[in-house]
Image (cartoon, rainbow, N blue to C red):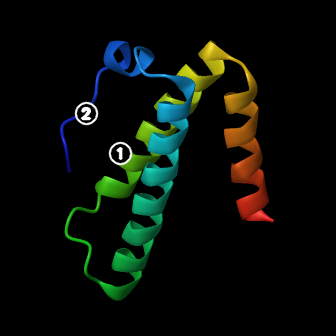
Amino acid sequence: MAKATKAADLRKLTSQQIVEQIDEAREQLMRMRFQKATGELTDQNAPREQRRKIAQLMTILNEKGGVAAKTAANKKTEGEA
């Protein structure tokens, strides 16, 4: 797994870039779930780190406010339905 990005670096990104990173992180988490189910996942702590990364990105996005935060939150709830 890649080295953790500092929050200060993430805050420099635009809202759109953060939303894109959230989407990528969610896709990676989904792949990890499949790997875990098939027994291919070697780092059992990776999904936890990925969820924390998503939470960190969502927090920074909410701090920035605006439409992008609401759009990202809506994508999450639509995906669960």
Depth check: give the residue in front, 44 or 60.
Answer: 60
Point out which mark residue 72 bears: none
Q: Which residue corresponds to mark 2?
A: 4
Q: Is residue 29 above or below residue 17?
A: below
| Badge 1 or badge 2: first in the primary sequence | 2
For the image, the number of numbered tags is: 2
Depth check: give the residue in front, 42 or 13.
Answer: 13
Q: Position of residue 8 (x, y in %)?
A: 35, 12
- Secondary structure found at label 2: loop
Q: Where is residue 1 in the image (x, y as percent from the top left)?
A: 20, 51
Q: Quadrant of the C terminus?
A: bottom right
Q: Which residue corresponds to mark 1?
A: 49
In the image as oriented, which residue stretches furthest toward the bottom? 38
Q: In this view, does 23 lie to the left or right of 45?
A: right
**Residue name at image x 29 percent, y 83 percent:** 39
Residue mark closest to the camera, 1 vs 2: 2
Q: How far apart are the two marked residues, 1 and 2, measured between alpha carbons? A: 9 Å
**Kind of residue sitting beneath label 2:** Ala
Q: Where is residue 52 in the image (x, y as percent from the top left)?
A: 44, 39
